[in-house]
Image: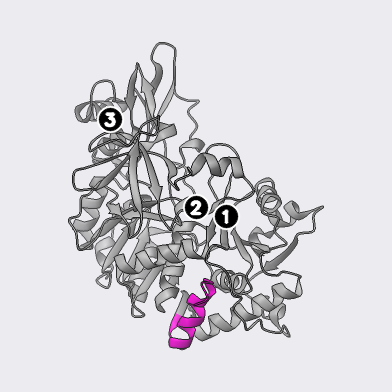
Amino acid sequence: MNPNLATLLTESAEKFPERIAVRLDDVAIPYAALDQTSKLVAGLLESKGVGPGDRVGIMLPNVPHFPMVYYGVLRMGARVVPMNVLLTAREVKHYLGNSGAKVVVAWEDFAPAAIEAAEGTDVEVISINPTNVGELIGGIEPFNDVVEVAPDDTAVILYTSGTTGTPKGAELTHSNIRSNIESIEDLFMPSEEDVFFGGLPLFHVFGQTVAMNGAVSVGAELTLLPRFDPVKALEIIQRDKVTIFQGVPTMYAAMLHVPNRSEFDISSLRLCVSGGAALPVEIIRAFESEFGTPILEGYGLSETSPVASFGRIDMERKPGTIGTPITNVEMRIVDEEGGVLGVGDIGELQIKGPNVMKGYWEMPEATAKAIDSDGWFASGDMATVDSDGYYSIVDRKKEMILRGGYNVYPREVEEVLYEHPAIAEAAVMGIPHDDLGEEIVAIIAFKEGKSATEDEVRAHAKEGVAAYKYPRHILIVDELPKGPTGKILKREIDLSQVG
């Protein structure tokens, strides 16, 4: 069998040529048409000098053109370099320079950054929009083959968020991503009858593997939402009879706060999946009570393709945990010296399995630091495991606050804050303190029409956590900054107002 990921599309197109592969409102593209367009995209790229092993940037939002280009690149044995459409020219320049991309396909609205980044280089920018694709591929000889690749050949170079230093390109192989898709099939039991919600950015590993590749692998439908809006999301679930919803915590919280949510018929939903960040237990309980659909919480990183662990329908669900390792994946908790810790101990989470990346592109030192000689990947997350083998993320290692000699894990304090009836979003961080080393600050946004005083918030937190953990400073904002997947970006929070 050819392990090339493009065969996910070609095989589904052969089995289900007339079934809808991807939808965006009134635009519905069957599998046969998606496959044919990917052949023409590959032919276009070949005419630009792209060949096996070359890198192609994709700077596209959640539109049907994304899978067209994605599978077109892969079928010719080239490598996909997905890029956030909101990147600045300076950031794009790093992606293109580091990956050595020959071509970047950019959505017209976001192409200026790519064009500026490509100035003075040999990189060609192909700007596309809803109407010019026909012109671009008109007269192009289709690339009908699917190039044979080795399982360990790189399929996608996914750049990490760069929260610490320069973004690094995680090399995900065809077998890395395939192993994750097999686990998704085992967990979700999807079929061609399913409709996947496509609100997670496809340029991000979660949306790309779990939603797009997960749907295409079984011939299911992927219904897209380019920019998340909770009301529009509920409309899409109702209109397209979505069966599998995949989102991040802020998406679930936003839908929960839609005033007329009960008016939408979402009875088609059979499964909800959450990842990208820890899902507060209060939101899980409220959402499942309100919408009557179970939420499975998972965990992973770009470097793990992304899924490493998940809750399961056929096992006890423990809200607040990230479940157990997926098939063929091992996890463990280690101390600072690399010693394996036991039940209940807090340490760094390490992961080993077929989902772990090949390495960081052109960065052997960073790769050696991240993956040891036995194949264990250091996640940078602090976690614990219980006696049943369920893991819980305590916090990012780098986000741990050291206050007066005590370790404070923001996640624990945030859980308590989310229990306050007026709080919609919360982030807990440390700020420098002359005597204590660090002091704790909570940045919060209220639900529409709700409010509380700083003292009330502080008192609420004090009731739920130990005295050294509650936030002494409260910063009230209208909304917390978020990344493309809806994850709260603590690095973008302005703490200058905290005195």
Which amino acid type corresponds to the residue marked 2 in the rendered image? Pro
Which amino acid type corresponds to the residue marked 3 in the rendered image? Val
Number of numbered markers: 3
Disc 1 designates what residue? 84
Q: In screen coordinates, is 57 left or right of 490?
A: right
Q: In screen coordinates, is 49 left or right of 70?
A: right
The correct choice, above or below, for 302 with respect to 215 in the image is: above
User: Which segment did they paint magenta?
Assistant: 1-20
Which amino acid type corresponds to the residue marked 1 in the rendered image? Asn
* Residue in view at x 76 percent, y 59 percent: 123
Assess whether residue 265 is covered by the magenta stretch: no
The quadrant where residue 333 appears: top left
Sooner in the amino-acid sequence: mark 1 or mark 2: 1
Q: What is the x, y in percent for residue 309?
A: 33, 53
Name the one closer to the observer, 429 or 355.
355
Name the one closer to the observer, 174 or 321.
174
Q: What is the x, y in percent for residue 28?
A: 48, 80
* Mark-to-mark CA distance, 1 and 2: 8 Å
Mark 2, Cα crowd under 10 Å, few <14 / some 14-19 / many 20+, is some
Q: What is the x, y in percent for residue 33?
A: 54, 84
Name the one closer to the observer, 298 or 223.
298
Query: Do the residues bearing badges 1 and 2 touch, measured as CB atoms within 8 Å?
Result: yes
Q: In screen coordinates, is 469 left or right of 495?
A: left
Looking at the rendered structure, which numbered label has been put on residue 457?
3
Disc 2 designates what residue? 484
